[in-house]
Amino acid sequence: MRPRHSGTFFVFLAALLYSIGGLCIKVIPWSGVAINGGRTAIALVVMGLYFRKTGHRLRLNRFIALGAAAVCGTNILFSLANKMTTAANAIVLQYTAPIFVILLSMLFFARRPSRLDLISCAAVLGGVLCFFLDSLTSGNVAGDVIALASGVCYAGVFMLNDLPDSDPLSSIFFGHMISAVVGLPFLMGETDFSLPTLTSLVILGVFQVGLAFLLLTIGLRTTPPVTACLVSGIEPVLNPILVALFYHEYISTLAVIGAVIVIGSVLTYNVLLARRNRRCAAQTQ
């Protein structure tokens, strides 16, 4: 598998793991901050094992700290939003990240998005908005605002490799560490430590945070931020579907149409991008 294609595949796998977050957070009867503190503490163990196996060493500078703030903000804000509004609202507003990636790239790196990027973003966001149109009208306003803020932070996560003298793995580790420290006092105040609660927390920590962030970091090494955001379009589709199936939050027919638009847009984007890259490579030979 070519590096670009393998990178995209890792991003896709990360999105699949991220998609279980809404369901597990709904199942755990804790506050959003407590849930995030517990899952990121477990994720730190996963990352520690990865560092030991690969020999990766932690670094810290102002840009790595900025990346850690983006990771921490994404973790905490999404957990809060999932408790304050529907899973559909939380994920659709977080999935405004591709737009913020384009805006941040233009402001700080003077990168002009291609026509294909803009059209694909419009199509994906249109599908996502269609998918959640009914729930967006009935969600909690404060939760929706927090979910939108998580989208800004999530855009920063996709741009970790673009920061000067960056080390995405260090940013993610320190971001999780801050999240765990912030959540610890809230976690200590919880009383329900039943088997379903702890099982859901372990699944979140090991897979939805720990492994997913590692896969995303590896994928972003060879995948542009906008492309990675679009490939992650599978997450806002699967997340509320899982919640609907196991937690019984309603999904309308319009939402199913939106799912088709999102998946179709992501697949079309990658096919067209691959063809364009092949043409460019042929012209340079």
Image: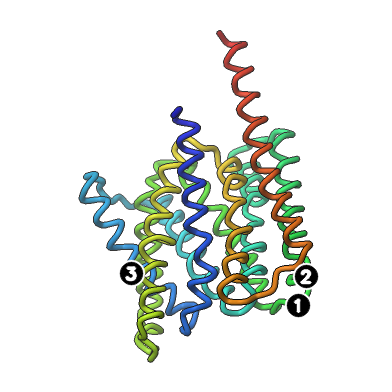
**Can residue 111 be seen?**
yes
- What residue does disc 3 label? 41
Question: Which labelled disc corresponds to residue 134?
Answer: 2
**SS for callout 2:** helix
Question: Which labelled disc corresponds to residue 138?
Answer: 1
In the rendered image, residue 223, in percent from the top left (x then y), is placed at 51, 37
In the rendered image, residue 23, in percent from the top left (x then y), is placed at 53, 71
Quick one: label 3, few (<14), some, or many (20+) residues within 10 Å? Answer: many
Spot the residue most to the top. Answer: 285
Left/right placement of residue 116 relative to residue 190 reads: right
In the rendered image, residue 69, in percent from the top left (x then y), is placed at 46, 61
| Callout 1–callout 2 Cβ contact below 8 Å | yes
- The answer to whether residue 243 is above or below residue 162 is below
- The answer to whether residue 212 is above or below residue 41 is above
Left/right placement of residue 243 relative to residue 2 reads: right
Quick one: label 1, few (<14), some, or many (20+) residues within 10 Å? Answer: few
Q: Nearer the viewer, residue 186 or 282?
A: 282
Left/right placement of residue 269 relative to residue 170 reads: right
Label count reads: 3
Q: Quadrant of the C terminus?
A: top right
Q: Earlier in the sequence, mark 1 or mark 3?
A: 3
Left/right placement of residue 219 relative to residue 184 reads: right
- Kindly indicate the quadrant of the structure image that contains residue 245: bottom right
**SS for callout 3:** helix
Amino acid carrying label 1: it is: Ser
For the residues labelled 1 and 3, the Cα–Cα distance comes to 33 Å
Image point (21%, 51%), residue name: 52
Image point (67%, 72%), residue name: 144
Image point (74%, 70%), residue name: 136
Q: Quadrant of the N terminus?
A: top left
Give the number of the mark in front: 1 or 3. 1
